[in-house]
Image (cartoon, grey):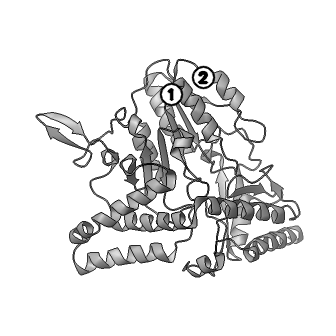
Amino acid sequence: MDVVALRKATPSLPGLAHFNAASSGLLSSEVVEALQFHLGEEIRTSPHAAGLAAAEAIENARDEIAWLIGATAPEISFMSSNSEGWNLAVLSLPRLRPGDRVLVGGGEWGGNILALAQECAAAGARLERIPELPDGRMDLSGLEEMMDDRLRLIAVTWIGAHLGHAVPVERIGRLARAAGVPFVVDAAQAVGVLPIDVNRIGCDILTAPGRKGLRGPKGSGFLFVREGALEQLVPRPMNLRAASLVAGEVVQRRDGGRFEASEYAPALRLGLGAAVRLANQLGAIAIEARVLERTARLRAALAEVPGLVLRETGAAESHITTFHMPEITPAQVQLALAGREVTITTVNTSYAPFSTVPMPQGSVCRASVSYLTDDAEITRLAEALCEIVTEHAKA
């Protein structure tokens, strides 16, 4: 991987030391060009005409997404965000009934939990948390003990937004398949970071955004629904792309178009296609190796900062590192770093309300790398944190 060339092909670099890839990646030149070209065509002709002209390129983008995750093109739907795809697919599953059980991981995204809690409350079903180990990793033995004939759904967030550990999705998939239970994976923080093969995972539904690890545009994403699971899902509400009326009966599409909006922004889909194409060219294994090495390097540097407490243990499993500084609030740390043109973010308990890993100050700092992150940026972050500690001690 030629990181120097990739950085040169990133318009925002050099500039800020970007440690917020888990919120949004930095757009590549390829993505910017795809966006700008299509918008130029909308100006030159008309939005409708430009959209028609882009139809083939958009389908090529669907093929790229399918290749990225080991799916087929008819199993892929374009979405405007990860949350849109997750909610649309999960709320299209058969209705829950009284006494049904739904299991989620401790690191499940807070928005997903809200949606499931609402559905369970309306149906008289139970939403339950899969046990966690003290370090925040999933307790698979606990999951096995929770499996029974009342279980109707297992939903996990592969990499939580609050902690850098990864859920063992393939092992969960085997348990779900053996029990005949639908399995949903929120891959918001995994796509573009870890290799994804939906057949190895065995999931029925997988969702992802374009704006994070893939470095695509905000307002883009995709949904995977396994072909064998498609007929079980009935989107609500319908539109003229999702279905048609035949002899007075609603007939749904038999591919991913069943979930897509009839009105969309072609530029965003083309930008997403450019981002996925770059990821496919680089290769998922090479990306993972680079990202995990960068994460390990970052954690080693942060471990030398006086008073800083790292929350992850063991080998790096993702691009996310979280930490806190007992004498300085996370918001103060973020603000002080921003003044030095270094970006991180803070996350609070709402990101993963079922997690048992404590946040001593109600929130923590999150630094997330990408394959673009270089040694100079890591040093810059660590030195800036040391300066902040010194300034706080003098204040």
From the viewer's side, name the closer residue of 115 and 215: 215
Quarter of image, res 228: top left
Q: Please report whichever mark, 2 or 1, sits nearer to the chain's N-terminal start.
A: 2
| Residue name at image x 61 percent, y 58 percent | 193
User: Which mark is on residue 147?
Assistant: 2
Helix, strand or loop under label 1: loop
> Residue at position x 53%, y 38% from top?
202
Q: Say whether residue 149 is left or right of residue 96.
A: right
Q: Judge by depth and name the residue closer to the eye, 62 or 26.
A: 62
Query: In the picture, residue 175 is in which quadrant?
Result: top right
- In the displayed structure, does residue 276 sit left or right of residue 329? left
Q: Amino acid at mark 1?
A: Val
Residue drawn at (52%, 19%) of the image: 150
Q: CA distance from mark 2 to mark 1?
A: 10 Å
Q: Is residue 372 visible?
A: yes
Question: Mark 1 and mark 2 in contact (Cβ < 8 Å)?
Answer: yes
Label 1, on which residue? 181
